[in-house]
Amino acid sequence: MQTQVAIIGAGPAGLLLGHLLRAEGIECVVLERQTGPYVLSRIRAGVLEQVTVGLMERLGLDARMKAEGLAHDGFHLADGKRLIRIDIAGLTGKQVMVYGQTELTRDLMEATAGRGLEVIHEAADVALHDIESDAPFVTFRKDGAACRLDARLIVGCDGFHGPSRKAIPASAGREYERVYPFGWLGILADVPPCNHELIYANHERGFALASMRSHARSRYYVDVPLAERIEDWPDDRIWDELAIRLGPEAAAHITRGPAIEKSIAPLRSYVFAPMRHGSLMLCGDSAHIVPPTGAKGLNLAASDVHYAAEALVRFFKAKDPDGISGYSDKALARVWKSERFSWSLTRLMHRFPEDGAFERAMQVAELDYIAGSRAAQTSIAENYVGLPV
Ligand SMILES: Cc1cc2nc3c(=O)[nH]c(=O)nc-3n(C[C@H](O)[C@H](O)[C@H](O)COP(=O)(O)OP(=O)(O)OC[C@H]3O[C@@H](n4cnc5c(N)ncnc54)[C@H](O)[C@@H]3O)c2cc1C
């Protein structure tokens, strides 16, 4: 098989990129290890910045998002005593869109056939070859048969554990990493949210987040030590813990219900640089991970895709390679700012086991400063809605 761009991974990054390239008449094939239903069963991000909304609009795939998504004007930080509202619309003139990653992926997936985007699911043993040449190729197995896909460029959209980043020699890049001493235990339930906007809470028992996917579906998290097991958290224990950590105001409005999904996700900050090596470009989680505290993971994948699509269109249509050679610097400039925001919000809103009285006093002082400062709130708001691409 031959194509112009081989895309590895059909998560949001791979599907968005594939659609953007097809819309420009560029040939591409997407290779995905899992089945479509499996990809859709993964419950992940839910807050979309303008960059992600804008790409869906550009593709004309925004109808369901506009009909079912919830446009939010603000969110709250809770410090155990009060709710500090960050008025993102008032401070930045922009909004965020609450729409599940699953739904966005479904919209992209359902449009593939109609738009001629070829996605090969259940592609096993995907391996990248000759990425330092102008004729790289990918090998994989499909239904037991050995297959080969030749391309001019490969884009790795295969998440943190995929083969793309690992194909880059260690000497050609650098890893930056911070692993946090806790994970987020999430519960998804078909109950109305306790508040119409998100609440991020720093309580003496730990962090909590009240979030939602729709008016009828709620997503809540509490942080737990990494050694914790999901079996030790029956639904009632999670609801009890949420009620304590979110505080009495929110707790009064929590509707309990059976979990339709429950999992513990470890938290990590990670960047691999550069994000291009020879004929291989990396997008999304294959190059970087953020803790979910700033709701940046999916949105960073979208901004990478925005830059990658721009570079690839320039390369194939204007025969100009400068976009490809400049891709990594351009993408990383925004990645590092989102990493900083996610790390600082994680630092502010969680109780770290190694922290002493001084670090706790710094959290109290910072939350107090934010509560009384329009400048501090504006800084948080402009990062939360997403920096420009
Ligand atoms: C448990 C969890 C919870 C999260 N919660 C949030 C959140 O609340 N808010 C937020 O902003 N972000 C969250 N994130 C992060 C967000 O979901 C990711 O940043 C986003 O999915 C990145 O999209 P992606 O397309 O780059 O990677 P992915 O969504 O990981 O997609 C990668 C794709 O590549 C495929 N793949 C992997 N290996 C191979 C292979 N060998 N061959 C072929 N295909 C392969 C995978 O099956 C997958 O479909 C969460 C992530 C996780 C894991």
Image (cartoon, rainbow, N blue to C red):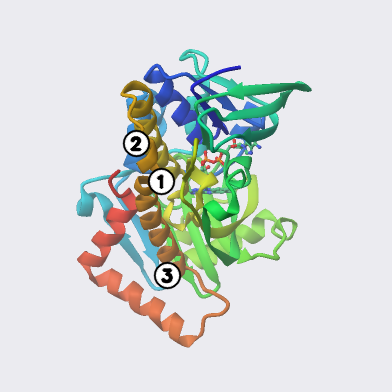
Cα–Cα span, label 1 and label 3: 30 Å
Label 2: element kind: helix
Mark 1 or mark 2: whose residue is earlier in sequence? 2
**In the displayed structure image, the side of residue 2 where residue 114 appears, left or right:** left
- Determine the image quadrant of residue 55: top left
Which residue type does callout 1 highlight? Ser
Figure check: 278 above or below 342: above
**In the displayed structure image, the side of residue 198 where residue 73 appears, left or right:** left
Figure check: 289 above or below 26: below
In the displayed orientation, state which residue is furthest to the right. Answer: 144
Q: Residue at x 29, y 69 (%)?
A: 370
Residue 106: image location, x then y, percent: 52, 28
Q: Nearer the viewer, residue 256 or 87?
A: 87
Which residue type does callout 3 highlight? Leu
Which residue type does callout 2 highlight? Gly
Label 1: element kind: helix
The residue tagged 3 is 348
Res 135 seen here:
yes
Q: Residues within 10 Å of mark 1 (few under 14, many from 20)?
A: many
Mark 1 or mark 3: whose residue is earlier in sequence? 1
Res 103 seen here:
no
Mark 2 or mark 3: whose residue is earlier in sequence? 2
Q: Residues within 10 Å of mark 3 (few under 14, many from 20)?
A: many
Residue 43: image location, x then y, percent: 58, 42
Q: Residue at x 39, y 29 (%)?
A: 312
| Numbered label attached to residue 328 | 1
Quarter, ligand 1: top right
Cα–Cα span, label 2 and label 3: 37 Å
Residue 81: image location, x then y, percent: 39, 73
| Numbered label attached to residue 323 | 2
Figure check: 184 above or below 376: above
Figure check: 376 above or below 253: below
